[in-house]
Amino acid sequence: MFYGDNNRWFVATVKGNDPQHRGRYKIRIHGLHSISVEDKHLPYAETMLPTTEGGVSGIGKISQLQNGAFVFGIFLDGETSQAPLIFGSITHLETPSTIQRDQIAVSGNPRLLTDRDNNKRAIVDLQSLPVVTIGEDLKDQYANGNSSTSTRRMIVMQQLISAGLSPVAAAGVTGNIESESTFNPTANNSSSIENSWGLAQWNDGAGRLQPLKNYATAKNADWQDFFIQLEFLIVDMQTNAWSRHRVWPRLADNKLTTRYDGVLDDYNATWNFFENYEIAETGLYKSSGREKNAAKAYYQYQASLQSTLNNLGIGQ
């Protein structure tokens, strides 16, 4: 089976380094490992190095693949598919390089909300971005930051629904936001591996925070303002090229987003936002109560809606 008569190739995403420092990488193979397979159960793959390296332990360079890298390889054991070998990485846009950012800035493409031009000023073409309007009634409910978590939960729900999401899709996003920051726009998670801020915990090291700051600057606002962050969240979901794909089109399609809990697939609004916007480890999803928070948001909104209908004499 090792002669190569039955070769099988794969494309995968790197999900972790080898704790034994043997140059292997944990990989999620596209088309083989579904999203229900936790990262801890994924296989390790050996890597192929160029012949310019020593080829023996302790001599020469080692592979420098990073988490999130797309890689190509083959299975050394053919159809058995238990011995993956990585040949190399495949280029893709995850976090733009400095050169890419400069090129985007010159092109004026607003989708990337890129950070700087040659004069080190933020470049955000607001006229080319979706318009998000925050109602004065929501600002009154916020009461300059003195509102309860319950009230903030409803503000986020109402704004997302006003922007075009169904209550189910809005609940999925809102449940994530509550888990990330408890709706605190100044929340900060700082550690050796991240420095994340705000409602959605935009990671500065991954290039996710600067676009928020640029958006706020373009609107002459404080980037830590609750409503500026809520505006940016919606604009970013609709135009975002920093994440794997724009999440808004699917979330806004009622036929493609049908629930906020259950199976971890893109029909699940909570999982879709977590996987494709937050871009975090699967284990964090299960431990942070996101679907429970989504359920709270959904049922609180439905109760509020029913109360309003009753007050109008329309409810049952």
Image (tube, rainbow, N blue to C red):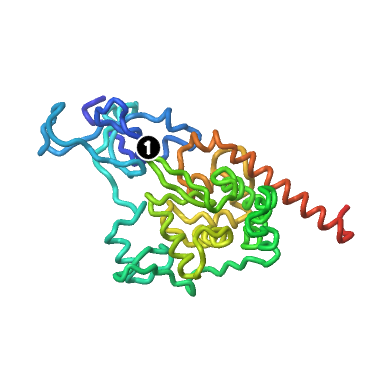
Q: What residue appears at the point 13 percent right and 34 percent down from the top-left corner?
A: 60
Where is residue 148 shown, x and y percent of the image? 68, 49
The answer to whether residue 300 is seen in the rendering is yes
Where is residue 135 shown, x and y percent of the image? 66, 66
Q: What residue appears at the point 88 percent right and 52 percent down from the top-left corner?
A: 316
Residue nearest the observer in this picture, 10 or 126: 126
Q: Image quadrant for the N terminus?
A: top left
Where is residue 308 shown, x and y percent of the image? 81, 57
Q: What residue appears at the point 66 percent right and 58 percent down from the top-left corner?
A: 142
Residue furthest to the bottom: 127
Quarter of the image for residue 86 reads top left
Establish if 235 lies above or below 39.
below
Q: Mark 1 points at which residue?
A: 15
Residue nearest the observer in this picture, 30 or 57: 57
Residue nearest the observer in this picture, 159 or 94: 159
Quarter of the image for residue 66 reads top left
Residue 119 placement, left or right of 156? left
How many labels sit on residues? Answer: 1
Amino acid type at image mark 1: Lys
Residue 6 placement, left or right of 226? left
Q: Residues within 10 Å of mark 1 (few under 14, many from 20)?
A: many
Where is residue 182 shown, x and y percent of the image? 59, 46
The answer to whether residue 268 is seen in the rendering is no
Q: Is mark 1 on a helix, strand or loop?
A: strand
